[in-house]
Image: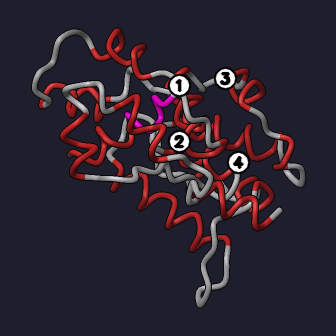
């Protein structure tokens, strides 16, 4: 299981040639493929970790989300060897250790309490059913936690910003992304990387 999780984290089973064959047909993505050959879609160690990171990252910068996750690790692990907190660890934190709006804090606490000692049971369907979790969060977890090659968070501000900077830009990002199936997660990674 650990080897499988590490392979998923680094997307070692990707087929860059097949991905490039589809995405390279898109004039706006072809220059990005040339600049970043062998594109991968990196992920998290587990669906739970990815879910926590995505919920924390709702409507904040990547840097702010990283800082909050670092605080969680520091609060729940040995100072000499901080690790990402488990559901049990997060469930044990008091409200003051969640530097975020109340609704997001409640979503994280519900997730942690629900999957305490059974993180491996968390699925995208179960995540989508949690209050405070929307399509963007599920798509991010599909990409980062599950390794889904064809997920695409169309409302992501970073993707929209990257798309606005591409030339040519023939249509809306949502409509254009449909042409990138079954490799939309890789297109998302290329666009994020362009920023």
Q: Which mark is residue 160?
A: none
Identify the mark nearer the N-term, 4 or 1: 4
Q: Which residue is mark 1?
A: 182
Q: Helix or strand or loop: what does disc 4 sit on? A: helix
Identify the mark nearer the N-term, 1 or 3: 3
Q: Which residue is mark 3?
A: 131
Gap between marks 4 and 2 measured at Cα: 10 Å
Which residue is pictured at 47% across the width and 58% down the height? 68
Q: Is residue 144 magenta?
A: no
Which of the two discs, 4 and 1, sits closer to the camera? 1
Which residue is pictured at 53% across the width and 28% down the height? 151
- Give, as a single range, the part of the protein colored magenta: 183-187
Identify the mark nearer the N-term, 2 or 1: 2
Q: Which residue is mark 4?
A: 48
Viewer-side residue, 83 vs 189: 189
Q: Is residue 145 above or below residue 78?
A: above
Q: Which residue is mark 2?
A: 54
């Amino acid at each position: 299981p650990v080897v499988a999780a590490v392979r998923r984290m680094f997307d070692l089973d990707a087929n860059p040639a097949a991905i490039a064959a589809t995405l390279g047909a898109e004039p706006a993505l072809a220059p990005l493929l040339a600049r970043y050959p062998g594109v991968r879609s990196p992920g998290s160690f587990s669906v739970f970790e990815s879910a926590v990171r995505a919920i924390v990252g709702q409507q904040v910068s990547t840097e702010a989300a990283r800082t909050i996750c670092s605080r969680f690790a520091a609060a729940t692990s040995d100072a000499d060897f901080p690790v990402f907190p488990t559901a049990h660890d997060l469930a044990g934190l008091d409200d003051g250790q969640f530097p975020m709006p109340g609704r997001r804090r409640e979503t994280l606490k519900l997730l942690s309490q629900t999957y305490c000692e059974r993180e491996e049971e968390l699925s995208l369907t179960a995540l989508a059913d949690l209050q405070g979790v929307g399509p963007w969060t599920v798509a991010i977890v599909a990409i980062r936690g599950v390794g889904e090659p064809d997920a695409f968070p169309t409302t992501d501000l970073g993707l929209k910003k990257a798309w606005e900077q591409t030339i040519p830009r023939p249509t809306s990002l949502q409509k254009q992304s449909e042409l990138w199936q079954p490799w939309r997660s890789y297109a998302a990674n290329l666009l994020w990387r362009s920023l």
